């Protein structure tokens, strides 16, 4: 079957670093996306990884290990506005997006 | 600037009513998608379309139908609304390549009483 797992909720402190993990088991793999979704709003694109390794984009970085079926999103210098849900999604062999349930990140002062 | 709009942010309907949810994108995207989002379940694909008048079933098409008469517009239809269709409905669009990011509309929170 197809499955994506990520923690339901995480809490971190403003200015700190947090790592949100995502593990997946899908039929075929054509890349992994991370989206950010603020409460009551639409998801917005953060990153796309298809090759192993770390991709950095400002305060946000995304890592992929295809052999381990594992990805993480790293957020540095956390700001209050980073409080949101973070959605992990993979593209399967049919190029369909399979979505995780999302990780709600709570930032405390 | 990329824009996907949905006809309503909030909608309340009664069981058995026919419900239309409209989605319009202004980016000339070929691909359009309808999802529902429920707590703890993530986004689930209802229907998608890769071209005008073309539609494909997603993971949970039962109880829904769609219409794509024009490239920019993708409509989701609930033929006879039921309480288990109370949910957040999200429309998205993307350019033709499969690994392109999807752009989402603001969502419609539908309550069926």
Image (spheres, rainbow, N blue to C red):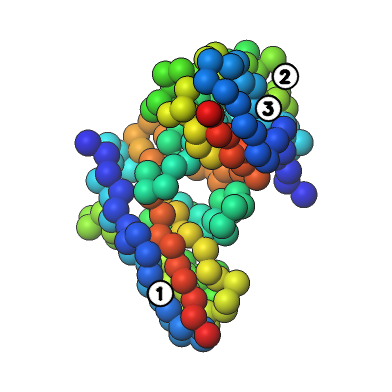
Question: What is the CA distance from the residue labelled 2 to the residue labelled 1?
Answer: 44 Å
Question: What is the CA distance from the residue labelled 3 to the residue labelled 2?
Answer: 12 Å
**Do the residues at discs 3 and 2 belong to one chain?**
yes
How many labels were placed on the picture? 3
Q: Mark on residue A94?
A: none
Q: Mark on residue B22?
A: 3
Chain on which label 3 sits: B
Asked whether the beta carbons under mark 3 and mark 2 sit within 8 Å of each other, the answer is no
Disc 3 residue crowd, few under 14, some 14–19, many 20+, Cα 10 Å:
some
* Element marked by disc 1: strand
Is residue B10 in view from this perspective?
Answer: yes
Q: Mark 1 points at which residue?
A: A11
Q: Mark on residue B70?
A: 2
Asked whether the beta carbons under mark 2 and mark 1 sit within 8 Å of each other, the answer is no
Rendered location of residue A6, percent (x, y)? 32, 57
Name which residue lies at 32% across and 61% down.
A7
**Do the residues at discs 2 and 1 belong to one chain?**
no
Name which residue lies at 46% across and 59% down.
A86
Chain on which label 1 sits: A
Disc 2 residue crowd, few under 14, some 14–19, many 20+, Cα 10 Å:
few
């Amino acid at each position: 079957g197809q499955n994506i797992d990520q923690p339901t909720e995480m809490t971190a402190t403003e200015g700190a670093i947090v790592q949100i993990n995502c593990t997946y088991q899908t039929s075929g793999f054509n890349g992994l996306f991370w989206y950010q979704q603020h409460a009551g709003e639409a998801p917005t694109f953060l990153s796309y990884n298809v090759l192993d390794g770390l991709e950095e984009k400002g305060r946000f970085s995304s890592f992929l290990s295809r052999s381990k079926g594992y990805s993480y999103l790293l957020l540095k210098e956390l700001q209050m506005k980073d409080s949101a849900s973070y959605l992990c999604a993979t593209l399967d062999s049919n190029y369909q997006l399979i979505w995780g349930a999302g990780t709600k990140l709570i930032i405390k002062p | 600037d990329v824009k996907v709009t949905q006809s309503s942010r909030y909608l309340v309907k009664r069981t058995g009513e026919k419900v239309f949810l409209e989605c319009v994108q202004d980016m000339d995207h070929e691909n359009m998608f309808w999802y529902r989002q429920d707590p703890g379940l993530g986004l689930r694909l209802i229907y998608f379309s890769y071209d005008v008048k073309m539609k494909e079933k997603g993971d949970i098409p039962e109880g829904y139908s769609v219409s794509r008469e024009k490239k920019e517009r993708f409509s989701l239809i609930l033929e006879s609304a039921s309480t288990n269709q109370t949910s957040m409905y999200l429309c998205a669009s993307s350019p033709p390549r499969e690994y392109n990011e999807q752009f989402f509309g603001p969502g419609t929170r539908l309550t069926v009483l």
